[in-house]
């Protein structure tokens, strides 16, 4: 999510008191997103529907704002079964499902319509078994939106970032992007980025618009370029250890409780547009790349693509052609 992440994480207790065969099973949900955000609203609707579907036998407690740990920590806990339902970002999940990093290849997608079509109509069956191999039951995609570029000065061409120290996310696609642009990337966790900007350790980076504005990055690096050079999805998963303990009826209660993805996508994208507009109105600097500038960025980065795909590991070489096929099938 990078605000990372963002979305749901959850812990499920399956203990039923003696003599209470129909006692409710209590699920504890958690998310790194604050209350009132689209991701928390999404989870709250899911919790309500799950309770209704199960006739009240599945209940839940919501933990928000990262109370159960950072996203990478929650991913590991979910694999081990200590967290049972988790929604997190592409970056976090790629630590255990490396092939997911392919979805962050720079300049892979042309527009949101293409992203939505590919993810929903073609790529769910591609990635579901990869999650399961790692002990995670894939439930649903989620959304963080386009990732943009920001800096202490305008970044409008590769020349503007050549040899500049910039923050890269702890993901190969982020380092790959900056390598192509000619910058000197410094891999940092999101939480360390503000202090790195304050000390001059880095002079910029890349983030989804929502994360950039919500974390106050604009106060430290007030130049935001809407590069949309990669899309950051997220996913909602359940620990396979938990999933296998549930009855078929309980499993159905959960899958039928999933809120339509278009709702959270629309909410996140609308919020991002609103936040960028507010940032600009308050004095922030926002730049749109011209078609010529965007082509210059692509020409700088695309020669690095084959090396990125090779470096990701796992079954990336097998999965990559399927992603390209999905993109072509969804071309508008």
Image (cartoon, rainbow, N blue to C red):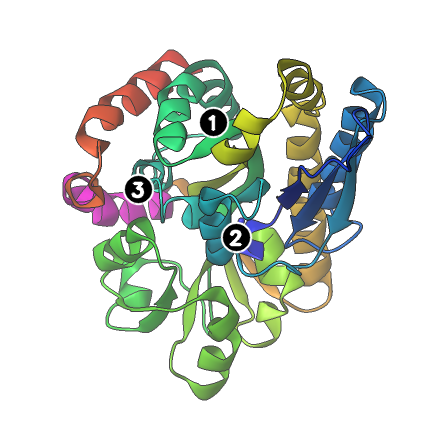
Residue 61 rendering spot, x and y as whole percentages: 78, 46
Residue 23 rendering spot, x and y as whole percentages: 82, 30
Quadrant where the image shows the C terminus? top left
| In the displayed structure image, the side of residue 168 where residue 212 appears, left or right | right
Mark earlier in primary sequence (2, 3): 2
The segment highlighted magenta reads: 292-308
The residue shown at (82%, 30%) is: 20
- Image-quadrant location for residue 295: top left
Residue 235 rendering spot, x and y as whole percentages: 53, 36
Look at mark 2 in the image and give the residue it sits on: 74
Q: Residues within 10 Å of mark 3 (few under 14, many from 20)?
A: many
Look at mark 3 in the image and give the residue it sits on: 98
Is there CB contact under 8 Å for labels 2 and 3? no
Look at mark 1 in the image and give the residue it sits on: 115
Mark earlier in primary sequence (2, 1): 2
| In the displayed structure image, the side of residue 26 where residue 224 appears, left or right | left
Is there CB contact under 8 Å for labels 2 and 1? no
Q: Secondary structure at mark 2?
A: helix
Q: Residues within 10 Å of mark 1 (few under 14, many from 20)?
A: some
């Amino acid at each position: 999510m990078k605000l990372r992440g963002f979305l749901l994480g959850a812990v499920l207790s399956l203990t039923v008191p003696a003599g209470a065969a129909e006692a409710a099973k209590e699920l504890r949900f958690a998310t790194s997103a604050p209350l009132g955000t689209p991701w928390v609203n999404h989870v709250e609707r899911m919790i309500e529907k799950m309770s209704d579907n199960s006739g009240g036998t599945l209940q839940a407690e919501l933990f928000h704002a990262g109370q159960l740990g950072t996203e990478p920590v929650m991913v590991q806990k979910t694999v081990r079964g200590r967290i049972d339902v988790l929604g997190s970002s592409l970056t976090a999940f790629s630590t255990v499902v490396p092939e997911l990093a392919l979805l962050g290849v720079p300049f892979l997608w042309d527009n949101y319509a293409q992203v939505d079509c590919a993810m929903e109509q073609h790529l769910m069956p591609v990635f579901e078994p990869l999650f399961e191999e790692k002990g995670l039951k894939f439930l649903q995609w989620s959304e963080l939106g386009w990732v943009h570029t920001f800096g202490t000065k305008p970044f409008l061409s590769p020349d503007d970032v050549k040899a500049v120290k910039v923050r890269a996310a702890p993901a190969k696609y982020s380092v790959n992007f900056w390598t192509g642009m000619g910058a000197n990337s410094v891999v940092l966790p999101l939480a360390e980025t503000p202090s790195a900007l304050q000390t001059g350790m880095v002079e910029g980076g890349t983030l989804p618009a929502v994360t950039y504005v919500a974390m106050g990055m604009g106060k430290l690096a007030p130049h935001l370029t809407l590069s949309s050079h990669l899309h950051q999805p997220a996913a909602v998963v359940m620990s396979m250890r938990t999933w296998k303990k549930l009855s078929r009826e309980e499993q159905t209660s959960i899958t039928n409780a999933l809120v339509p993805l278009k709702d959270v996508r629309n909410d996140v994208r609308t919020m991002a547009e609103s936040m960028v507009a507010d940032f600009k109105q308050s004095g922030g600097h926002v730049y749109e790349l011209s078609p010529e500038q965007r082509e210059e960025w692509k020409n700088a980065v695309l020669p690095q693509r084959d090396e990125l795909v090779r470096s990701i590991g796992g079954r990336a070489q097998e999965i990559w052609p399927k992603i390209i096929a999905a993109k072509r099938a969804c071309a508008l």
